[in-house]
Image: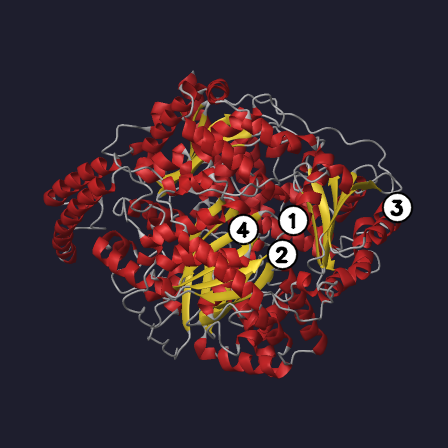
Amino acid sequence: MRRAMTPTAFVLLVAVAALAAAAEIPDRPEKLVYPDLSFEVPDAAALRFELADGTPVYAMRDSQFPLVTITVSFRGGRYLEPAGREGLAAITGDAWRSGGAGERSAQQLDEELDFLAANLSTSIGEVTGSASLNVLSKDLEAAMAIFMDLLTAPRFQQDRFDKTKDNMLQAMRQRNDDAEDIEDREWQRLIYGDGYWMNRLATQASVDAITASDSKAFVASLVRSGNLVVSVAGDFDPAAMKALLDRTIGTLPRIEAQLPPVPQPEHRPAAGVYVVDKKDVNQGRVSIGRLGFREGDPQEFPLRVGADILGGGGFTARMMKRIRSDEGLTYGAYANLDFPVSMPGTFRATFQSKSSTCAYATEIFFGLLGDMRAAPPTDEELRTSKASFIETFPRRFASAGQVAGLYASDELLGRDHGYWTAYRDRIAAVSDEQVRDAMAAALDPSTMIVLVVGNIEEILQGHPEHAARLGDFGEITRLPLRDPMTLEPIAQ
Amino acid sequence: MSLRRHRVIAGLAMAALLGALPVAAQEAKVPVQEFILDNGMKLVMVERHESPTVSAGWVTHVGSVNEEAGATGIAHLFEHMIFKGSRTIGTSDYAKESEIMARLDAIRLEMEAEYEVMREMKRRGEIAGSIYLIENQTPRLAELRARMKALEEEQKQLIVKDEFDQIYTEAGASGLNAGTSNDFTVYFITVPANKLELWFWMESERLLNAVFREFYSERDVVREERRMRVESDPTAKFDEQFDFMFWGSLPYHHPVVGWPSDVESITLAQARSFFATYYAPNNITAALVGDFDTEQALALAKKYFGRIPRGAVPPPPVVTEEIEQLAERRMAAEAETNPSVQVRWHAVPFAHKDAAALDVLDSILNGRTGRLYKSLVEEKQLATGEPSSSFSAMKYGGYLEVGAELAEGADHRQVEEALLAEIERLQKEPVGERELQKVKNQSLADSYRRLQSNFFLLLQLMLYDVWDDWRYLNDSPARIQAVTPEDLQRVATTYLTPTGRNVLWYSRKAGTDEDPELGALSAQGKAMAKQALAQINQLSDPAELEQGIAQLQAMAGQAPPEYKPAIELVIKRANERLAELQAAAGKEQ
């Protein structure tokens, strides 16, 4: 099939081509004229309905492909792990799917789902968890029976449970292998403090202590009516789907008491330079930043734009231009300011450079940060950043699965759907001076933590052609490497 | 970005075209429209109107396989250069800039001559390490470098930094990126549906009027990329050498990012000739998937891409064939990683008629209901995680690799034997009907799943066209359904031979997560000693520590023999810690 066109289409095509050829190609892309494009945020209320027991469902049809996805999301996650049971959420999330359910052993359940070509996954994260089924729509009924067994009668079969724990231990053994993992772990510690739930990580002892009944009880406490939001997307009949959900997910037992809220961090991070020695790499990994903000902060939108101009927007951002393009000091340089719903996020700038130029690149970064706080961004920067936020916004709603999933997560986390309808206007309203003021107020360099992981002796020496040294950015504290299994400091 | 070379089994049906609810077993086709422009450029398009965006890209049929000795990494270097703009984009005064660039080239030629002097010095042993290190530069080179730097500074004043990205970003495009592989270099982006003409303008501009500005400084970025991806990664540097060992004559043996010495020495003249040959429209496939009108898009393609002249000479074919491997090869690496075993055999290129059977064979081995998991993890308990098989097929060759991570207490030999036992079973016994049907069911469902994302469909169209033909997307499901148990037995016997094996053992490098004395202990002893040492490090009261040592000494007498060395080590360390604490206390007093 070289050309599959009707004669009429071909005539039309010739006409269009003739028109196009007649038009000159402009010498600059700014001279191109585009047709209008409007995008309306899908109406969340129109997609929402409730099951008989009150469980909210967001369902969006798309019959392009004969597939359907049902996701049950619930509140609760790692922050609920009891002391001494660190790792329970991750282990439960994994062993849940692999451990069998109802009448089926783990092996039977795997075989049946694989034969149906169904993807069924479970996971429990920081503050929420989910179980999700994706299957050919013709096989929905058969797969749904297994899915319900998994929600109501998971077995956590012992041999599979032990395997999950072994895999977890095996992954923990790798904790110091990659400098990036050390960097992420120490960063979290420095920002949120040792005692915060996020930093209570699994150890050999805590994994050893976790039993299949712990996991069973954990799932049973969370997968309950009153604690769930369901999303459905793909090829289904709405009335039949509602009936199916009422008969299945709508019959789960009621939650007894609402879960405790996610604790907020009380730790006040201490500014300074922190280094972790990792001898056999020739590149240092640098993270610079501080504790950030929750979604809904009054400065959220000016800060989003500011961080994007500083280091968010790929090659158009100042960090990439200076540290990568001008100086060739790094492959990637980014600044990220996230705004989680449940706790404050972080401001974190990252790059990686050969040992001798880590300090020099850090100096350039602080120069860039100083500029952001001292003066408003240029008109072009502001225009580019805002246009990028606004024009790429529809991509969050590109598929039925994305729309249903986004609205379900809003309801689960307690975010108003209005956040999305107002989003583009709020970006559009950001002014250059608001960006400067917000960055100046939020990102004082004297509050910053600088974390460097790499060959510290080489990194401290700096570069013969540049004066910058790591000590210029604060007092240097050496952090010990931690034993991967106990997370206790290793004497060095 | 680096795209992995994994083969993807491609898609089946486009339900929308059928107008009714499709039935899974029914074979429909993705309605792809193909056009060839007069200059030889191929254009493939799929209209989909669900979201107001278009995923757009083009792939040039050149990768590291086309590189000559001494210029490895040039294909990947281009992936970076193509973002540097054109005569219009990225500059405030192109005429002035090109003058400076000519002077830069002249200096670089003088530097090349000096580098050759330095290479000679290195061969004589007068220079240690890379000739590109600052500490190794000769006075003459230092002078030339300074002149070059000054000129680059001058050019910088004329450069409009990353304007190419800026224009796209402001237009609301996203995901602008590129990737280089052994066989291809691909460029892609997603644009708002109303701005498709911008894509045609920008992409035809950078092909027609490319300017390789910052050519010499960009390789510093590439060096950092290599440091990040390869040299500072616990296993990537060994994987690179395993690849090098695996491939014989076929130019898949060198890394896509190039040998460091080559990347530093590529000249602008080499780059220009490479571009003229491989970035000609007759070597390019462009693709669009999303919300556009095919006829309008074709008109734009003719208008914009049509103005690029066909290349003067067609790209030379890759003529070197892989030499037959005559004996098993082995590599044992100590790295900061969990111990594992991998076994790899030469298989077939992507377009080969046996590729479908190897895809199925791969799936028979993979996953939790696959044979490797059942045998190595569940029955023999020799491996952790999910042992895996992967069939990687490229344009000129392919391989099948199986691998597993060792369970505590298992040794490499046992795991290798267990992996090979599963291969032998495939050779000796036909695969059962239900087992085969399971894989076929999954292939069918996955072929729908793989069509769901516009961007992923775009990528498949482009890469299949490099490896074989984009029609593979519509043809491959039927090929998978046609695979028989006899086919599986035949390909297992033909390709997975004892003399064709390439074996890689990873062992955890002693003393990486621990000191060497700990590494010397038995597994049980090590676990015990680690916990004890961690506790000791926490103690700051000398009296408490002394008490602990006494208890340990009492234990040492009764402990089973395999724990003895561990206890002795802990006692030794506790005494050292005690001495430290006492010394510190002495200082304070």
Q: What residue type is disc 2 on?
A: Gln
Q: Name the mark on residue A399.
A: 1
Q: Where residue A276 sits: x, y (%)?
A: 43, 35
- Using the numbered discs, state the Cα–Cα distance from disc 4 to disc 2 in whole angstroms: 14 Å
Q: What residue type is disc 1 on?
A: Ser
Tell me, yes or no, whether the two marked residues, 1 and 4, touch with CB atoms within 8 Å: no
Q: What residue type is disc 4 on?
A: Val
Tell me, yes or no, whether the two marked residues, 1 and 2, touch with CB atoms within 8 Å: yes
- Using the numbered discs, state the Cα–Cα distance from disc 4 to disc 3 in whole angstroms: 43 Å
Which chain is home to disc 3? A
- Mark 4 vs mark 2: tell me if same chain: yes
Q: Is residue B81 above or below residue B363?
A: above
Position of B98 compared to B299: left or right? left
Q: Name the mark on residue B452.
A: 2
Q: What residue type is disc 3 on?
A: Thr
Q: Residue at x 34, y 29 (%)?
A: A364
In front: mark 4 or mark 3? 4
Q: Is residue B432 at all visible to an observer of this figure?
A: yes
Q: Residues within 10 Å of mark 3 (few under 14, many from 20)?
A: some
Position of B569 compared to B222: left or right? right
Q: Where residue B121 sits: x, y (%)?
A: 13, 54
Q: Name the mark on residue B54.
A: 4
Q: Earlier in the sequence, mark 3 or mark 1?
A: 3
